[in-house]
Amino acid sequence: MSVVQLSPRVQQLHEALAAFVEDECIPAEAEYRRELGEGAQRWTTAPQTMERLKVRARALGLWNLFLTREYAEGAGLTNYEYAVLCEVMGRSPAIAPEACNCSAPDTGNMEVLAKFGSAAQKKRWLEPLLDGTVRSAFAMTEPGVASSDATNICTRIERKDGGYLVNGRKWWISGAGHPRCAMFLTMGKTDLAAAKHQQQSIVIVPADARGVTVVRPLTVFGYDDAPHGHCEVTFDNVWVPAENLVLGEGRGFEVIQGRLGPGRIHHCMRSLGMGERAMELMIERVQARTTFGRKISEHGVVLDYIAKSRMELEAARMLVLRAADMIDRVGAKHALKEIAMAKVVVPSAVLAVLDRAIQMFGAGGVGPDTPLADFWAGMRTLRIADGPDEVHTRQIAQLEIRQHNARRASRQGARAPAKL
Ligand SMILES: Cc1cc2nc3c(=O)[nH]c(=O)nc-3n(C[C@H](O)[C@H](O)[C@H](O)COP(=O)(O)OP(=O)(O)OC[C@H]3O[C@@H](n4cnc5c(N)ncnc54)[C@H](O)[C@@H]3O)c2cc1C
């Protein structure tokens, strides 16, 4: 499973993307941070560096690669092919994904609109998102309830005056702080009397609708992730027209399943890129520094760190590529176990690599002069934000037992004597 096996077109994209990320995105990281500035300015600035790189990525044909071949609006790639490219973007996670219009949460939201959106919703919301002129957010999690079980969500979406009235409090809504955030795909309950998984619906709430308040940006281990951020947001008697309902009343779970499938292994793909960058930094560092009369790289324990890191990254990559390949061949619904395994294994593997790389930098590793501390904070967060590990492991075990029982039943059926 290497780049060599990819089609000539994807190999070309890979080469162009690798050069773009190494030569243009990574060198622009410091300038991007400077342009963001300080204090309140961080939430009102769309840094010019990003706008410049978006133009470049588009000119290089590195735009909207995430939308796979089943969508007319997409770049025509498979999930497997995108996995290889997405990893490259992950090497500069604050810059490259957005520069290529492949960043979360927009990718998942665009997928939802491409898959389930009406013609009018596509025109009004999907087109500007695909064009990279606006950004978006996905509003599901609530402070008041355990949101890893989405049936708990209690924001109300009630019919009113030919549309819907939305009332609720959300938090950790990524992207809500961005000055160009145009809309929230918002999950709430339309029918409290319906079956457990049919009470929920998704509506598009324009960010400038009356009653929408971005209360505060939250921080992740002290990082504010401006300008997009992760925010607490309230919806206070927000009225939206009926045409803003996505797919249909009571179909919120169908929509989030669509969103959380392929889209969610994108995080795993990008994480591998962060792991690879950490490996490179670690290897450079241990060869450049001397302790106790020899290079750090010559201490046996450090060789062990490097070898373990390589093995863990390779194993994690195999899981991601297998999940992507399964999605391509049998669909996300039949790749749930593979997707869940990748989501559990990858962040932990990359965290371990980051931890060793940080260790090799000594105090410098926890400071601002390498990207390692920032990467670590993001990766630790992923073990919760992408669905908590325990929720995925529960699903893996349940599927494993079900598959085992199905295999046993089919073996027993095969051995049973044919009825005369
Ligand atoms: C940086 C960041 C960005 C985010 N972005 C978004 C966003 O854009 N939109 C959005 O809607 N949400 C977002 N989230 C929220 C995220 O999806 C939720 O935090 C996550 O689903 C968990 O929900 P919760 O925080 O309510 O935890 P809870 O549901 O309260 O769960 C708490 C803990 O209980 C444990 N647990 C849960 N279920 C089980 C189980 N079955 N077995 C054993 N243990 C279990 C887990 O350890 C879990 O972490 C983001 C979160 C972070 C940190």
Image (cartoon, helix red, strand yellow):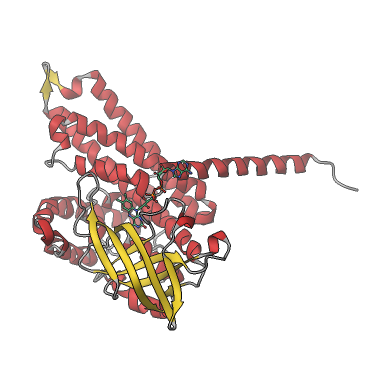
* Residue sitting at the far bottom: 162
Residue at 42% over, 44% down:
342
Q: Can residue 38 be seen in this view?
A: yes
Residue at 11% over, 51% down:
30
Q: Position of residue 405 (x, y in %)?
A: 66, 41
Q: In this view, does 73 lie above or below 359?
A: below
Q: Which of the 4 image quarters holds residue 70?
A: bottom left
Q: Can residue 65 be seen in this view?
A: no
Q: Position of residue 210 (x, y in %)?
A: 29, 75
Q: Which of the 4 image quarters holds residue 49?
A: bottom left
Query: Along the horizontal axis of the image, is 225 left or right of 267?
Result: left
**Circle count:** 0
Q: Where is residue 387 in the image (x, y as percent from the top left)?
A: 41, 49
* Residue sitting at the far right: 420
Query: Along the horizontal axis of the image, is 332 left or right of 51?
Result: right
Q: Where is residue 116 in the image (x, y as percent from the top left)?
A: 46, 70
Query: Along the horizontal axis of the image, is 240 left or right of 55?
Result: right
* Residue sitting at the far top: 293
Judge by depth and name the residue closer to the eye, 5 or 230.
230
Judge by depth and name the residue closer to the eye, 178 or 306.
178
Query: Along the horizontal axis of the image, is 267 left or right of 254?
Result: left
Q: Which of the 4 image quarters holds residue 362?
A: top left
Position of the N terminus by quadrant = top left
